[in-house]
Image (cartoon, rainbow, N blue to C red):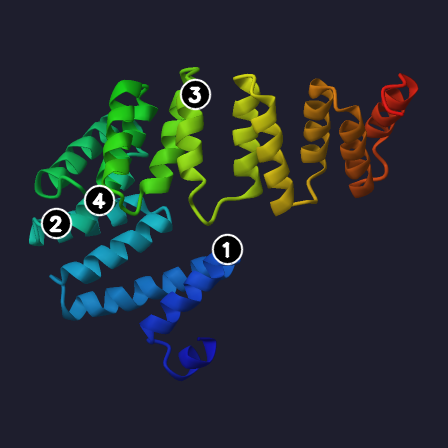
């Protein structure tokens, strides 16, 4: 993409793709630089076509990413003024306002409600309403909208399950949290840490066998996490399987040899004569 941009600095498609790559590899400086270049291109285009709602929307989104909220808001509001049915602009504006305090969050709720009046199954609008109600500590409403987002089976299915799980944990409703988490784990992009958290929930409800299963799954995904082995050792110790407990302690020590606590733990198990 850089070569294409050398030949044509206004090649917006290449610029967007390159900035996406910078974002993925966390090259923040170059990512921001490319966004600024996109703003300049959109600004030049808007001089020629000032009422182009798509250009206003795209520049507004970039302004928001660059944390230039006033300019982002102005572009999005103008796009909506020119096209009152521009759903994506409403959603972006609502998302922006949801981070700006209680008063603006209430405005965001009204914006998302407007979206739902025309698209009642818009999973993103439903999800964002759940997020706002959660921030406002209106957990009953939050649960309602996360469930509605899940029912659409849309793009926000897995984020909604994750958010709903956190609310159930906050409420101490661990069985419901586990149900949500298991649905969330259908997501092919789950991390080892997700399985670790599910293991923790099973510990809370006293189901050690399931906790062991999911912690072993986490280790199968990422076998370099010393603390997972240590936690697994504790679980095996609870079940009386001291041989496995020592095995996992030794696994943890093999990752980081200079861990005196784990070494002492292994010696303690042996000294107590729990492992033959």
Kindly report the distance in space between the C-alpha atoms of the residues bearing marks 1 and 2: 30 Å
Measuring 44% from the left and 32% from the top, which residue is drawn there?
Answer: 181
Could you say where residue 145 lies in the image, as x and y percent from the top left?
24, 30
Disc 3 packing (10 Å; few <14; some 14–19; many ≥20) = some
Q: Is residue 251 left or right of residue 35?
A: right
In space, the residues marked 3 and 1 are separated at their CA atoms by 40 Å
* Residue, disc 4: 91
Q: Closer to the camera: disc 4 or disc 3?
A: 3
Circle 1 residues within 10 Å: few <14, some 14–19, many ≥20 = few
- Lower sequence index among marks 1 and 2: 1
Residue at the far front in the pictured view: 276
Which residue matches tag 3? Answer: 175
User: Are the residues flagged by discs 1 and 2 in contact, CB closer than 8 Å?
Assistant: no
N-terminal label among 3 and 1: 1
Viewer-proximal residue among 129 and 148:
148
Quickly name the residue at label 1: 28
Q: Secondary structure at mark 2?
A: helix
Q: Is residue 201 left or right of residue 54?
A: right
Disc 4 secondary structure class: helix
Pointer 2: what residue? 80
Answer few, some or many: residues within 10 Å of disc 2's Cα (few below 14, many 20 plus, some between 14 and 19). many
Quarter placement of the C terminus = top right
Name which residue lies at 86% across and 29% down: 263
């Amino acid at each position: 993409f850089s070569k294409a941009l050398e030949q044509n600095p206004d090649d917006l498609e290449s610029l967007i793709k390159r900035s996406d790559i910078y974002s993925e590899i966390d090259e923040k400086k170059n990512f921001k630089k490319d966004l600024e270049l996109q703003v300049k291109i959109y600004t030049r285009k808007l001089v020629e076509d000032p009422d182009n709602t798509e250009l206003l929307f795209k520049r507004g989104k970039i302004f928001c990413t660059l944390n230039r909220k006033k300019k982002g808001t102005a572009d999005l509001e103008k796009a909506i003024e020119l096209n009152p049915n521009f759903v994506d602009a409403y959603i972006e504006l609502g998302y922006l306002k949801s981070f700006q305090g209680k008063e603006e969050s209430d405005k965001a709720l009204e914006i998302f409600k407007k979206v739902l009046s025309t698209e009642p199954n818009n999973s993103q609008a439903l999800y964002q309403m759940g997020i706002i109600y959660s921030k406002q500590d209106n957990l009953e409403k939050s649960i309602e909208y996360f469930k509605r987002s899940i029912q659409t089976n849309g793009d926000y299915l897995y984020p909604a399950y994750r958010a709903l799980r956190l609310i159930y944990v906050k409420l101490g409703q661990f069985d419901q949290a586990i149900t949500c988490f298991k649905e969330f784990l259908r997501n092919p992009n789950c991390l080892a840490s997700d399985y670790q958290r599910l293991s923790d929930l099973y510990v809370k409800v006293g189901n050690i066998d399931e906790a062991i299963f999911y912690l072993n799954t986490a280790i199968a995904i990422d076998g370099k996490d010393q603390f997972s082995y240590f936690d697994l050792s504790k679980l095996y110790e609870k079940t009386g399987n001291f041989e496995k407990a020592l095995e996992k302690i030794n696994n943890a020590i093999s990752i980081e040899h200079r861990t005196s606590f784990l070494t002492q733990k292994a010696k303690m198990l042996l000294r107590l004569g729990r492992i033959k």
